[in-house]
Image (cartoon, rainbow, N blue to C red):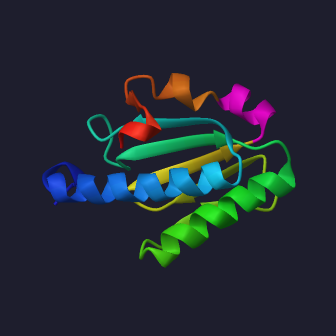
């Protein structure tokens, strides 16, 4: 069964996961927080959450907070990439993928442009 066939229940779970991740990022003062709903254009996840941090320590703290809060809620990370260098950390929770960038790499990779066919969602509306 592919992601498209799993139905509304998975999307509700994805929304809950996204809310938890967003709250964790906001608690640690993430900047330029964006949520992109990619559920209708990709099978890899339902949401991308993109945020920026000012330096390596903040980016790692953002990652740690998101991972801790979602793990406590029963959604452990499947994979974390880039933690040591902390210029782009990717945290894969299967249904949501969290990207935390430094400012330079966020501009360079420009995921918002690459995934422009997704629907940007106001975090408060989740």
On the rendered image, what quadrant is the N terminus found in? bottom left
On the picture, is 26 further left or further right than 43? right
Residue drawn at 41 percent across, 76 percent down:
74
Task: Find out whether residue 15 is within the magenta segment.
Answer: no
User: Percent from the top left, x then y, of residue 20?
Assistant: 47, 59
In reply to whether residue 103 is colored magenta, the answer given is yes
Q: Residue at x 69, y 45 (%)?
A: 30
Q: Which of 33/26 is in front?
A: 26
- Is residue 77 at least partly visible in the picture? no
Give coordinates of residue 9: x percent, y percent: 18, 59
Towards the viewer: 14 or 23 = 23
Q: Is residue 16 visible?
A: yes
Q: Residue 68's x, y, as percent?
A: 59, 72
Position of 9 relative to 112 (above/below): below
Residue at horizontal 75%, vertical 35%?
Answer: 105
Q: As rendered, which of 41 and 68 lies closer to the eye?
A: 68
- Residue 110: percent from left, percent from top: 62, 27
The part of the chain drawn in magenta is 102-109
Locate the C terminus and report the quarter of the image it occupies. Answer: top left
Q: Dominant secondary structure of the magenta stretch?
A: helix
Count of labels in the image: 0
| Residue under the point 43% across and 32% down | 122
Left or right placement of residue 22 versus residue 63 in this view: left
Q: Nearer the viewer, residue 2 or 8?
A: 8
Is 28 left or right of 24, judged from the image as shown?
A: right
Q: Quadrant of residue 75?
A: bottom left
């Amino acid at each position: 069964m592919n992601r498209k066939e799993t139905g509304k229940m998975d999307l509700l779970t994805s929304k809950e996961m996204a809310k938890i991740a967003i709250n964790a990022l906001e608690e640690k003062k993430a900047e330029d927080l964006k949520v992109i709903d990619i559920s209708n254009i990709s099978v890899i996840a339902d949401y991308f959450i993109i945020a920026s941090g000012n330096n390596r320590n903040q980016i790692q703290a953002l990652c740690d907070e998101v991972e801790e809060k979602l793990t406590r809620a029963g959604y452990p990370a499947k994979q974390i990439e880039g933690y040591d260098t902390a210029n782009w950390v990717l945290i894969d929770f299967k249904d949501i993928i969290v990207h935390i960038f430094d400012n330079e790499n966020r501009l360079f990779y420009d995921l918002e442009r690459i995934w422009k066919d997704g629907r940007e969602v106001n975090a408060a509306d989740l």
